[in-house]
Image (cartoon, helix red, strand yellow):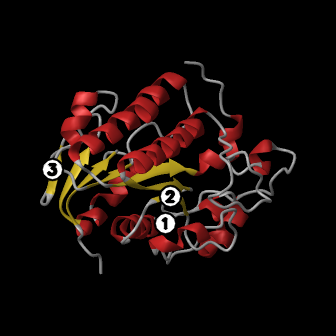
């Protein structure tokens, strides 16, 4: 059973893939789910509010955050690409979000970070949240900035944040890499629920993964959150192996945890 500890929960990036997957699930976590994205994505249904906002617009973000008790922040650019949009949404936009949270007394944020913060570690390594960031591109770099920004706002203003380094959250793994990085939608909801309800969150970095037999990430630093994944990529292993070829171990895509992101671009500004 999900405990409702927040009256109004703000979900940014509500029109995206993960936002869409979480929309109904997160209604169990609150009385009112406030949904936000940059462009119109349709009307609100029962128990919902919709407030459109461009993250780069500080006034719009301030209005979006006002009255919220906690924030699940999925908004922003979610792929590698030119620096300009990443700068506006993921860097300036995140600053606007935390400033609004500070101004309105919001004390808990679940920030969608990414496995691409550490994408240049090798696939034959196991890392913890204590390992230094090794971003695999501009997108990963923006998420590393977000983790540092959220730590500043915790240390200075007491805003607790879970930086969730989401792996690959899809209905099922698409390739062999995702056997290590897969996060089911239900486990994503379990993880966010744990981050919202644990008594003391602090500033925590959590790897967003299901209970996969093969993994590159040691999540032991996040045991205080209470996340217990229930799903696993292992049930898809035979099917994934049958439809994919063995990796070329000389290919950087197969060498590094970031996969294709380590060779994407350059995209310029």
Residue named by callout 3? 49
Q: In this rendering, which labeled residue sits more in front, label 1 or label 3? A: 3
Q: Residue furthest left?
A: 46
Q: In this view, does 266 lie above or below 73?
A: above
- Expressed as whole percent of the image width and height from the top left, the position of residue 228 reads 49, 77
Give the structural element (helix, strand or loop) at label 2.
Answer: loop
Task: Tell me the crowding category of disc 3: few under 14, some 14 to 19, or many 20 or more residues within 10 angstroms, Cα based.
Answer: some
Q: In this rendering, which labeled residue sits more in front, label 3 or label 2? A: 3
How far is disc 3 from disc 2 in space, using C-alphas? 25 Å
User: Toward which corner of the image does residue 173 lie, by quadrant?
Assistant: bottom right
- Expressed as whole percent of the image width and height from the top left, the position of residue 9 reads 24, 56
Q: Do the residues labelled 1 and 2 touch (CB within 8 Å)?
A: yes
How far is disc 1 from disc 2 in space, using C-alphas? 6 Å
- For marks 1 and 3 on the same chain, the one whose residue lies earlier in the sequence: 3
- For marks 1 and 2 on the same chain, the one whose residue lies earlier in the sequence: 2
Residue named by callout 2? 169
Residue named by callout 1? 184
Q: Which of 21 and 204 is in front in this view?
A: 204
């Amino acid at each position: 059973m999900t405990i409702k500890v927040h009256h109004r929960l703000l979900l940014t990036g509500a029109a995206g893939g993960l936002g869409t997957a979480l929309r109904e699930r997160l209604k169990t976590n609150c009385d009112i789910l406030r949904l936000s994205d940059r462009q119109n994505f349709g009307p609100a249904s029962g128990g919902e509010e919709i407030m459109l906002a461009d993250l780069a617009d500080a006034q719009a973000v301030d209005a979006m955050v006002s009255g919220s008790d906690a924030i699940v922040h999925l908004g922003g650019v979610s792929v590698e690409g030119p620096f300009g949009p990443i700068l506006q949404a993921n860097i300036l936009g995140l600053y606007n979000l935390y400033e609004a949270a500070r101004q309105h007394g919001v004390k808990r944020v679940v920030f969608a970070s990414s496995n691409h913060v550490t994408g240049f570690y090798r696939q034959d390594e196991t890392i913890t949240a204590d390992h230094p960031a090794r971003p695999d591109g501009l997108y990963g770099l923006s998420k590393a900035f977000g983790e540092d920004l959220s730590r500043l706002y915790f240390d200075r203003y007491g805003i607790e944040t879970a930086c969730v380094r989401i792996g690959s959250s899809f209905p099922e793994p698409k390739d062999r890499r995702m056997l290590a990085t897969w996060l089911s939608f239900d486990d994503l909801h379990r993880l966010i629920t744990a981050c919202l309800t644990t008594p003391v969150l602090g500033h925590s970095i959590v790897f967003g993964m299901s209970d996969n037999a093969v993994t590159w990430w040691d999540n032991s630093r996040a045991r205080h959150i209470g996340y217990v994944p229930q799903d696993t990529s292992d049930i898809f292993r035979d099917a994934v192996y049958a439809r994919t070829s063995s990796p070329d171990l000389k290919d950087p895509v197969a060498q590094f945890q970031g996969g294709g992101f380590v060779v994407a671009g350059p995209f310029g500004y």
